[in-house]
Every structure is written in C-alpha cells, then in structure tokens.
Image (cartoon, grey):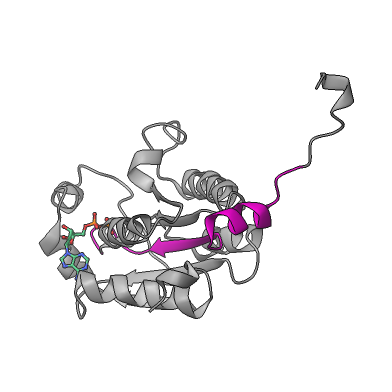
Amino acid sequence: MRERERGPAREIETEHYEAQQGHQGCVVWLTGLSAAGKSTIATHVARRLFEEGSHVYVLDGDSLRQGLTRDLGFSPTAREENIRRAGEVAKLFRRAGFIVLAAFVSPYRKDRDFVRSILDDGHFIEGYVSADLDTCIGRDPKGLYKKALQGAIPEFTGVSAPYEPPLAPEIVLDTTAQSVDQSVHAVIDLLDARGIRKARARG
Ligand code: ADP
C-alpha cells in the first residue's frame, strides 16, 4: 500500500505492550547504602523474570554514570538531576511494558518521591534495601568505603553525605537478616500480589 493510502499509524499504548508480553510494566526502585545489596537483588530478580520470558531491564546507578549522567557529580543538586534522569528512563521502559529493576543509592527522599510522582499508582514499588553502615563497610565489594573513610571520596553516602531512609516503602529488604534468595522471593511475591508478573508464572 502506498504511504498516503495507509492512514495514520495507531500508537502503541502501554496496554498493547503488556497484552503482548503477558505481564504488566512497573518500576521496582531499590534504594539503600552502597553495598547494601541493591544490584545483587536487582540482578537476581531480573534473571528469574527473564527466564520466565518477561521483559525486564536493570537500571543501575553505576552504569548510568558512565554515560547518560557522566556529567554529574555527587552534590545534592547533581544527585537530584541524576535521579530525575534515571526516573525518566525508568518511566520510558515502564511505558513499553518492562519490569524495571532500578538500583540507585538515591539518598534523598524528595528525589525518590519525584520518581514516584511520574509513575502511575501501583506501578512504582519502592524497596528499601537496608543494611547497617558497619555491615556495608565490612562488605565493601568495590573498596569504596575504604577510600571514602580515608577521605579520598568526598560526599560519600553514609560516610560524608546523608542517607534518608524511606518512610513508607512498599517493601523492606533487610540484607543483614535475610539471604539474597529470601529478598528475591520477597520481591517476586510482591509482584505477584500486585498482579504484575506473568499469570502463568505465578505459583
Ligand atoms: P549495592 O548495589 O547496594 O551497592 P551490591 O549488590 O553491589 O550493593 O553489593 C552487595 C554485596 O553484598 C555483594 O557483594 C553481595 O554478594 C553481598 N551480600 C552479602 N549478603 C547479602 C545479602 N543477604 N543480600 C544482598 N547482598 C549480599
């Protein structure tokens, strides 16, 4: 058919993606101190959903800072902009029906609340990945606390910059008390309770 005979293309709405994919889109936003376990949990949940055939994507603070937000530092205003951009990207994925696992320290409550405000009700799940500072320092998988405690990294959350825990997160994942597997199950159970996961995968 020639172009002018085809008529306007119908926009692909979120519901269309969701119907094709067999699950809803949503953003699971994991916040917490560095080394609390955000990326570990996000990766495991994503792998599990991926293997069920779901459309998932992990958005990670570290990887975004290598590209989209590489111009930003760690001052409160730079962090605000970092989370604003990350939130907008998450929103686009969610619109395409993806289940987004977002792992960001996101230390400021108002920045996380902004992301909540741009996503529909019920499609933003704030997960507080909690571990006390001593545990995080003990884990220190990237050696960042060691450097921060020596003063080599300024404005490091938990050491020389504040962290504001969520007041009413949808889920708390205390990684000092529960295993990675338990946290993964807790997230999956919540997705099931919200009717987000593929119906045939729910068990
Ligand atoms: P974040 O993304 O919050 O900075 P990471 O997931 O990169 O944290 O690192 C957390 C580290 O803690 C990993 O090396 C992980 O294996 C370890 N860890 C130990 N116990 C747990 C647990 N129960 N839950 C999550 N991570 C854990």
The quadrant of the picture occupied by the C terminus is: bottom left
The quadrant of the picture occupied by the N terminus is: top right
Rendering coords of residue 97 (x, y %): 57, 54
Counting the numbered discs, the total is 0
Closest to the observer, 84 or 108:
84
Residue 8 vs 85, above or below: the answer is above
Residue 114 position by quadrant: bottom right
Ligand 1 quadrant?
bottom left
Q: Is 26 on the left or on the right of 140, as rendered?
A: right
Rendering coords of residue 89 (x, y %): 54, 45
Whether residue 132 can be seen here: no
Q: Is residue 195 magenta?
A: no
Q: Which residues are magenta?
A: 11-36
Residue 120 position by quadrant: bottom right
The residue located at (15%, 56%) in the rendering is 140
Rendering coords of residue 129 (x, y %): 33, 69
Q: Is 60 on the left or on the right of 197, as rendered?
A: left
Closest to the observer, 1 or 193:
1
Rendering coords of residue 59 (x, y %): 41, 48
The residue located at (50%, 69%) in the rendering is 125
